[in-house]
Image: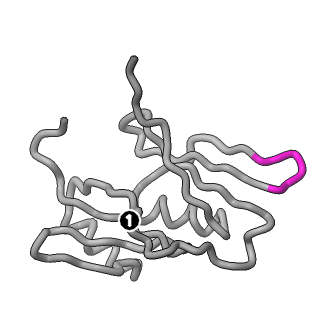
């Protein structure tokens, strides 16, 4: 029996703002959406178009007016940047860098809902 990643989910308060952020900051594109018949939720699936894995954003009508409790925000998603320096310049321009660890050669950006996303330099050989 084999398993492989399908998607990860993040809850968002403003779907359009989040879609714009993920497109501008990480180049992810919207692949499909689902809206509940009663309007209580909206799902958006984003992809880097390099594999099957997707990022699912969930907007909940009942939660649009107050931020999510992210705890200590130790959970995060990580992205390889093929051009690390260019990515860093873009994220500086967008004002979304929230933490840098120069010794490790990584940094984190923060999305509109406070989620941290790790940016890694390109790998020489992927698994």
In this figure, which residue is indicated by the disc labeled 1? 117
**Residue drawn where x is 50% and y is 74% of the image:** 71
The quadrant of the picture occupied by the N terminus is top left
**Residue drawn where x is 47% and y is 44% of the image:** 47
Residue 41 place in picture, x, y as percent = 76, 54
Between 50 and 63, the one nearer to me in the picture: 63
For the residue carrying disc 1, how many other residues have a C-alpha within 10 Å: few (<14), some (14-19), or many (20+)? many
Q: Is residue 67 above or below residue 80?
A: below
Residue 95 place in picture, x, y as percent = 39, 82
Residue 14 place in picture, x, y as percent = 67, 69
**Residue drawn where x is 80% and y is 67% of the image:** 62
Between 111 and 71, the one nearer to me in the picture: 71
Q: Is residue 71 left or right of residue 96?
A: right
**Residue drawn where x is 77% and y is 47% of the image:** 35
Q: Is residue 63 above or below residue 123?
A: below
Q: Secondary structure at mark 1?
A: strand
Residue 68 place in picture, x, y as percent = 62, 73
Magenta span has 47? no
């Amino acid at each position: 029996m084999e398993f492989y990643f399908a998607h990860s989910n993040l809850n968002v308060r403003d779907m359009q703002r989040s879609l714009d952020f993920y497109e501008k900051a990480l180049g992810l594109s919207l692949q499909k959406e689902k809206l509940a018949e009663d309007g209580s939720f909206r799902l958006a699936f984003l992809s880097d178009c390099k594999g099957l894995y997707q990022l699912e954003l969930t907007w909940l009508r009942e939660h649009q007016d107050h931020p999510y409790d992210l705890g200590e925000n130790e959970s995060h998603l990580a992205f390889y940047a093929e051009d690390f320096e260019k990515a860093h310049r873009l994220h500086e321009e967008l004002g979304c860098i929230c933490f840098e660890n120069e010794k490790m050669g990584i940094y984190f950006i923060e999305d509109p809902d406070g989620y941290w996303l790790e940016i890694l330099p390109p790998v020489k050989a992927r698994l």
